[in-house]
Image (cartoon, helix red, strand yellow):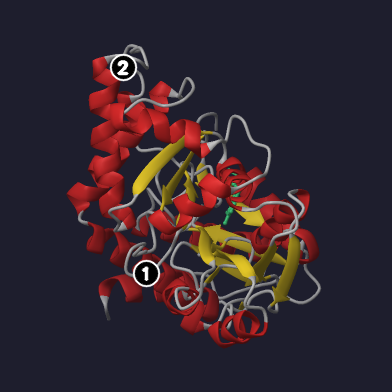
Amino acid sequence: MQDKSYLMIPGPTPVPPTVVAAMTAPMIGHRSEDFQVLHKDIITKLQKIFQTQNEIYILTSSGTGGMESAVANTVSPGDKVLTLVGGKFGERWSELTKQYGAEVIEVNFEWGTCVDPQVVQEKLAANPDIKVVFATQNETSTGVTNDIESIGKIVAQTSALFVVDGVSGVGGIEIKVDEWHVDILTTGSQKSLMLPPGLAIQSISDKAWKVIEANKSPRYYFNLLKARKQYPKWNTAYTPAVSLFVGLNASLDMMLAEGLDNVYARHKLLREATRAAIRALGLKLMADESYASPVITSVYAPEGIGADDIRKVLNNEYNITFAGGQAKLKNKIFRIAHMGFADQMNVLIAISGLEMALQKVGYPVELGAGVRAAQQVFLGV
Ligand code: PLP
C-alpha cells in the first residue's frame, strides 16, 4: 500500500510529525537575528544531551562529513593515531586517517564484540606518541555499544585526544562528554535524533582546540577555526541547512520533554523486548548481553537461509524494512533498528512480520512466540 511503511533501519529513521511540521515553516535568513536565537537555543539543548560545557558545532553534511571534520582538524600528515575497530564504522576511522597521511595503529576486535579498554591501555603505553584515539560509541554494523567511559578515562591519562563517532548512538544511548573525557564527539541527524539526513553535530574540548590550532592538514569547508570565528555571534561559516536546524530544535524539545533518562530507558526496554523475541524464535543474536546496543539488534539468519531473503519478504509483503549485513556480514545477518522515534508497537510489528517472513522462507516458527516474549518484557510479566 502506497505511503504505508515500517522503516526499521539505522538511519534515516522515521521523523515525528511534529518535527516534519516544524520544518515546513517559512525560510529565515541565516544571518538574521531569528537564526541566531534559534542556533543558540539548539546548542544549549544539545549541551544537555552531550552532557558537556564544550562548544558544539553543527555542520551541514552527513555523519561521515563530521568524521572527516574531526580527522582533518586534528590529524597532520605523519601523526600516529590509534583506531579501535570492531565493524564497518570503526574501519571508517582507519580509512579516513590514512587519507590524511596518518601512521595508523589499527586494533581489531572480532565483529560483534566490543573494544577491550585494557588493549587500549596497552597500546597507549607502548606508543606514547599516539596523538589521537578514534572510537565508535555504537557500532551500527554489528549492534554493539562500546564502553566509552572506560576508554575515555584511559585516554585522558595521556596527551592523546579522544574522538568518538556517536552517529547512531547519540540521542538513544547516554553519553557524558565531560565526565568521560571525550574531546570530540561527532554525530549525525538522521538516526537517534529523529531528523532527516543532512546535519553533523560535534562538540570540541579545549584540549582539542589546541591541536586544531596547530594542525597542518588542508581543510576548507570543514575548517573548524572558521566556524569558531562565527560561534560568538551564533552564526555558521557557510549557509546552513536552515530547515533542518528548525527540525532539530523541535526534536530536541521532544526528547527533553520526554526526559533524557526516559528516552534512554525506552531504548533499553526496546532492546530487551527485541532480544527476548529473537531468542523465543530460536534465532541467534550477534552481540552479547553485556554490550548489546540499545538502538539496534543484529540477528543471524537461520542456517541455510539468506538474511536478505527474509528481508525481501518483509519488504515486499509487509512494508517492513530491516537493514542487512554489511561487508563480510552481507546476507548473514539482518539488523532491526529501534532508535529515535521508536516505541513498543514498532517492535511488536517488526517481530510479528518477522515470524510470518520466517514461515514463508521455510523456517517455521511457533507463530506468536516472539510477539508474546516481547509483550512479556513490556508488561513485566
Ligand atoms: N558512523 C556510524 C556509527 C554510522 O552508523 C553511520 C551511518 O550509518 C556513519 C558513521 C556514517 O554516517 P553517514 O552515512 O550519515 O555519512
- Residue at the image position 77 percent from the left and 49 percent from the top: 99
Q: Which quadrant does the N terminus fall into?
A: top right
Residue nearer the viewer, 53 or 75: 75
Question: In the drawing, does residue 71 fall left or right of residue 41?
Answer: right
Residue 136 pos. (x, y %): 56, 64
- Residue at the image position 32 percent from the left and 69 percent from the top: 179
Residue nearer the viewer, 147 or 32: 32
Residue 13 pos. (x, y %): 48, 44
Residue nearer the viewer, 354 or 262: 262
User: Are there few (<14), some (14-19), or many (20+) residues within 10 Å of tag 2?
Assistant: few
- Residue at the image position 45 percent from the left and 47 percent from the top: 202
Q: Residue 238 carries which label?
A: none
Instruction: Answer with mark 1 or mark 2, whichever residue precedes in sequence.
Output: 2
Residue type (three-letter) at the residue carrying disc 1: Lys
Question: In the drawing, does residue 349 fall left or right of residue 354?
Answer: left
Residue type (three-letter) at the residue carrying disc 2: Ala
**Residue underneath mark 1:** 268
Label 1, secondary structure: give it. helix
**Residue underneath mark 2:** 25
Give how far apart the Cα atoms at labels 1 and 2 are. Answer: 34 Å
Residue 122 pos. (x, y %): 62, 87
Indicate which label's residue lies in the foreground, 1 or 2: 2
User: Looking at this rendering, what residue extends furthest in the front direction?
Assistant: 214
